Image (cartoon, rainbow, N blue to C red):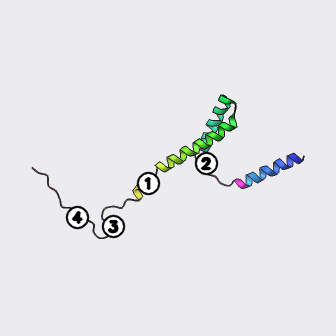
Amino acid sequence: MRILATALALTVMTGLGAGAAEAKGCIKGAIIGGVAGHYLAERGVVGAVAGCLAGRALANRRARREVDYGSRVQPRGAGYGDGPTYPSRNYRY
């Protein structure tokens, strides 16, 4: 009975302390890693943990690539003054 009460208290404390976590890539990686670990080495939990870490790293890498650089670039003439005026070029020969 004492072990059951300790396990229940530990479960409740873990559940309350979890909060909202960003698990982009972790869920899919854990599923794939768990299945692969189970069938290849009979170590499903280790595969799930490794898959979660790998999926999270791939999601972070993908997020870094998708930076919106257009929001940093100002349109021509949006700075100080009117901006430089370039002479019109005529390339007729």
- The residue labelled by disc 1 is 68
The verdict on residue 54 being magenta is no
- Neighbour tally class for label 2: few under 14, some 14-19, many 20 plus, Cα within 10 Å: few
- Residue at 74 percent across and 52 percent down: it is 15
- Residue at 87 percent across and 46 percent down: it is 3
- The residue labelled by disc 2 is 23
- Neighbour tally class for label 3: few under 14, some 14-19, many 20 plus, Cα within 10 Å: few
- The residue labelled by disc 3 is 79
Residue 1 located left or right of residue 66: right
Residue 34 image-quadrant placement: top right
Residue 32 located left or right of residue 89: right
User: Given the image, on which type of amino acid does mark 3 rest?
Assistant: Gly
User: Given the image, on which type of amino acid does mark 4 rest?
Assistant: Thr
The answer for how far apart the CA atoms under marks 4 and 2 are is: 51 Å
Q: Start and end of the magenta stretch?
A: 17-25
User: Given the image, on which type of amino acid does mark 2 rest?
Assistant: Ala
Does the magenta stretch mainly form a helix, a strand or a loop?
loop
Measuring from the top left, give residue 76's x and y in whole percent: 31, 62
- The residue labelled by disc 4 is 85
Measuring from the top left, give residue 21's x and y in whole percent: 64, 52
